[in-house]
Amino acid sequence: MEDLTKDLVRVKSINGTEGEKDIGLFLEKRLREIPYFKDRPNQVITKVIDNDPLCRRSVFALLKGHGGSKKTVILHGHTDTVGLSGYGKLADFACDPDRLQEEMARLDKLGMLDLSDEVRADLKSADYMFGRGSSDMKSGDAVFIILLEELSASDTLNGNLLLMLNPVEENLHTGVIDSIDVLLDLKEKYNLDYVLAINNDFTCPSSPDDRFLHIYTGVGGKILPSFYIHGRETHVGQCFEGLDASAVAAAILERIQLSRDFCDTEGSEPTFPPSVLKIKDLKKWYNVQTAAEALVYFNYYVHEESMDSITKKLLHAAEEAYDTVESHLNAEAQWFFKMRNEPYKSVHYKKQILTYDDLYKLTCERCPGTDIPSELEKICENELSNGTDLREIPVAMIRYLIETAGITEPAVVLYYAAPYCPHNTFTEKDGKLMDIIRESASEVGKKYSVSYKIHPYYPSLSDSSYLRIDDDDSSVAALRDNFPAMNKLYPIPVDKIKKLNIPAVNLGTYGKDAHKWTERVNLPVTMHILPDLIREVLRHVFTVK
């Protein structure tokens, strides 16, 4: 497992690069070398993502157990990594674990590396492997492959295992979404009953003093609420005569960023609060005019809260932010003109705080003879052909609606953008599976003198979101209404996901600092304890009637 992890890390499969194609080819070749699959080449399947310029592929391997059982467990992981930002002078070694650790030790000895005591101790320890993707999650892929190889050579497997390794997890989850049809086809072809999906994406200590290992029986959802701000531009020499869109965007950020008000507190654990992912004005060049347009969007985790409830809270936050900016403008203008002994009349614009659906309906109402859907489709296609970022294509559509509706006063338009990750949780019907997880964790914990904590939601983003959808129809509909061109920009086959309906658990690799330059995986836990935990879960799943 350790050797294969190093081999996988050496394939620089950074999201959005040719390396994602390379690792798919590497994995296919490695799986086909397993004697079981040499004799059954048709049970290794690849699926190149539709219309993907990089020809990235998902790789599947079906291991059929003895006795003809239909029970099937999916082992799934992702093959891409984030980039090398932060590595600096170590970037050339980031994907070579042995050389990276040698270079880190050399530079640290020379006093040329700023390491914390914890990182330095782990570097000196034989328990950790450093490198991009070592923890997130190439060690997990290696664990699955070696377990599959081991089990394929034995006669102890009383069910079926389907390995699924997907690219494009680190941003749009395109790999797993594109694989849904493959899962349905294999289900029908081989008469498979998907009873559980096991992901082993990275886990880590929740705090410096955390001594537990963590299991997550489900995954939370994620949306991307985005605010387009239509302000009123002005010359900086008449700065009180307009409403700066950038100021409104900043106030929305101030109101929402990391705020507990937007944590989903359903269940035993709250979600992490929203984090801003982009904020900018939409000026294309420098001038001395204040910004007429701005954009800000957030990562927003969801457990159980409905889209209607979330949307209402976000609209209220936008209104509060707008009022804050307008109040500040008037207060500062009043002081300024008083100092100049000039009269001042306070400014109050006819603000409009709208959802995209509100704006669309308003435009249709004001322009009954206009074929608005066709115009929006043309705009979307044009922006796609120009390579516009998926999250910003709706901006051009909103501009058209605002202009067509004749809106000249300041406005804030809330819309949702890609990606949308449904939440996938254990339900009451999964009680036997929960018992299996608890019993397996207890048995392995006793064997290795470790303790597990079991949580209802994986606290990060996961491809497991696309194997079962718990969002109800009304929430999905509310999202679609305010997600411009969702069927074109981020088509989610909701009906097919509901047909799969596979509960998911994350029995993860264990490491530290995923997505940081000090990323590292703990070898004893990941290469010894984790495989035993997976074996125990499989043993129980395939023996329970």
Image (cartoon, helix red, strand yellow):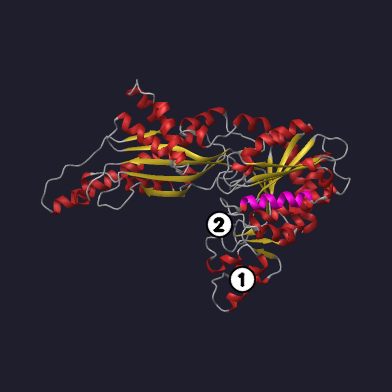
In the image, residue 426 sits, relative to residue 522, either above or below, namely above
Q: Hey, what amino acid is under mark 2?
A: Gly
Q: Nearer the viewer, residue 334 or 394?
A: 394
Q: Nearer the viewer, residue 428 or 104?
A: 104
Horizontal and vertical percent position of residue 356: 41, 33
Q: Quadrant of residue 203?
A: bottom right
Mark 1 is surrounded, within 10 Å at the Cα level, by few (under 14), some (14 to 19) or many (20 or more) other residues, namely some
Task: Count every numbered label the image shows and give the total.
Answer: 2
Dot 1 falls on a residue whose secondary structure is helix
Horizontal and vertical percent position of residue 57: 65, 45
Horizontal and vertical percent position of residue 80: 62, 51
Outermost residue, bottom direction? Answer: 110
Q: Is residue 219 visible?
A: no
Quadrant position of the C terminus in the picture: top right
Q: Is residue 494 magenta?
A: no
Q: Is residue 27 magenta?
A: yes
**402 with respect to 144 (left or right):** left
Q: Hey, what amino acid is under mark 1?
A: Arg
Q: Quadrant of residue 242?
A: top left
As drawn, the label of residue 387 is none
Dominant secondary structure (helix, strand or loop) of the stretch shown in magenta: helix
Dot 2 falls on a residue whose secondary structure is loop
Give the number of the mark in front: 2 or 1.
Answer: 2
Which residue in the protein does label 2 denote? 83
What's drawn in magenta, residue-wise? 20-32
Q: Nearer the viewer, residue 524 or 281?
A: 281
* Residue at left offset 52%, top offset 66%: 88
Horizontal and vertical percent position of residue 280: 38, 49
